[in-house]
Amino acid sequence: MNVALNVASPPTLEARYSPQKAFRLLRGSAAGMVPPAVLILLPIRWSRGNPTFLLYFLLLLLGGCAVVAIRRLVTVGRPVLTITAEGIFDKRIASRIIPWRMVRGISTGEQKSKTGKTIITCVVLTVGEADEGQLALTRWTRLTRGLNHRLGADGLVIRLEGLDVDYDQVFTAITTHVEAARKIWSSVGACALGITKF
């Protein structure tokens, strides 16, 4: 039996690295590297211990942030996160699109700001273990799964630091596409997704 579907597809959302945020990160990293570099180069005799190791570590950490900022500037015009009627594609998480049919649940991490406003800190996709093997997860995603789980985010975590969209835009796009998918699935008798907050 053929089922006729007349469900309008919501618009696609594409998120890219923000050049303003990348420049701000680069500027802050470069400025932060000056003090430890000066302290390393100056012939200082430390009276209590030698912080040279910590200074090198700080220099390495800030240098890594500068590299990240430069990389974002180089790829500033390319989509990083794409939300479509088919699913979500985040190149930082997986090399393939995550279709809605694989997503068992969508949750958000939230915290209160100083003004009392609720702020979304991350969006988490719950995907079955069998389906994860088909997504070709990035090495970074595989390495951070355990840490994210201990922090309460049990799933594929989408963060928006450095992107030109905010969490409200992304969460609205996700819920809009999920509702559209629910209408299609209800027409063919499929189960719907759950959206929760933690």
Image (spheres, rainbow, N blue to C red):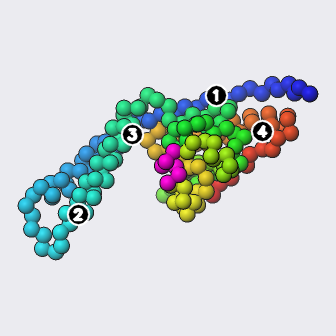
Q: CA distance from mark 4 to mark 1?
A: 16 Å
Quadrant in which the C terminus is drawn: bottom right
Q: Which mark is residue 21?
A: 3
Q: Residues within 10 Å of mark 4 (few under 14, many from 20)?
A: some
- Which quarter of the rendered picture does the N terminus lie within? top right
- Mark 1, Cα crowd under 10 Å, few <14 / some 14-19 / many 20+, is few
Q: Which residue is mark 2?
A: 53
Q: Along the polypeptide, which appears first: circle 3 or circle 4?
A: 3
Q: Kindly report the distance in space between the C-alpha atoms of the residues bearing marks 4 and 2.
A: 55 Å
Residue 127, position as x, y percentages in the image: 66, 49
* Closer to the camera in the image, 116 or 38: 38
User: CA separation, marks 3 and 2?
Assistant: 30 Å
User: Which one is in front in this view, the residue at disc 3 or the one at disc 2?
Assistant: 2
Mark 1 lies on residue:
11
Q: Which residue is mark 4?
A: 182
* Identity, as a three-letter code, of the amino acid under mark 2: Phe
Question: Where does the magenta region start and end?
Answer: 138-143
Q: Quadrant of residue 30?
A: top left
Q: How many labels were placed on the picture?
A: 4
Neighbour class for label 3 at 10 Å: few (<14), some, many (≥20)? some
Measured as percent of width and height from the top left, residue 143 is found at: 49, 54
The x, y position of residue 27, in whole percent, is 28, 42
The secondary structure making up most of the magenta span is: helix
Q: CA distance from mark 3 to mark 1?
A: 25 Å
Instruction: Name the residue type under label 1.
Output: Pro
Q: Residue at the location (61% across, 42% down)?
A: 135
Q: Secondary structure at mark 1?
A: loop
- Which is nearer the N-term, disc 4 or disc 2? 2
Which residue lies at the image location 65% right of the left edge and 54% below the top edge? 197
Occupied quadrant, residue 4: top right
